[in-house]
Image (cartoon, grey):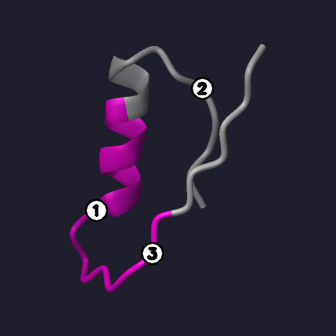
């Protein structure tokens, strides 16, 4: 099974980045975690 690590950086101001990433990954059938 291929693995990919994606790092996103920048200023995040209470926009719900982790829940957004989780929803998008789930929608696309991906598994993993968001730190």
Viewer-nearest of discs 3 and 1: 3
Q: Earlier in the sequence, mark 2 or mark 1?
A: 1
Q: CA distance from mark 3 to mark 1?
A: 14 Å
Q: Is residue 18 left or right of residue 4?
A: left
Q: Dot 1: within a 10 Å radius of its alpha carbon, few (fewer than 14), some, or many (20 or more) residues?
A: few
Dividing the picture into quadrants, the one containing residue 22 is top left
Residue 28 sits above or below residue 21 on the image = above
Q: Earlier in the sequence, mark 2 or mark 3?
A: 3
- According to the picture, the residue beneath numbered tag 3 turns out to be 9
Q: CA distance from mark 2 to mark 1?
A: 19 Å
Q: Are marks 3 and 1 in contact (CB under 8 Å)?
A: no
Dividing the picture into quadrants, the one containing residue 26 is top left
Identify the residue at image location x=33%, y=20%.
27
Magenta span:
8-24
- According to the picture, the residue beneath numbered tag 2 turns out to be 31
Q: Which mark is residue 16?
A: 1
């Amino acid at each position: 099974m291929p693995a990919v690590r994606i790092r996103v950086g920048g200023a995040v101001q209470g926009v719900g980045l982790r829940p957004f990433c989780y929803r998008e990954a789930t929608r696309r059938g991906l598994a993993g975690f968001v730190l």
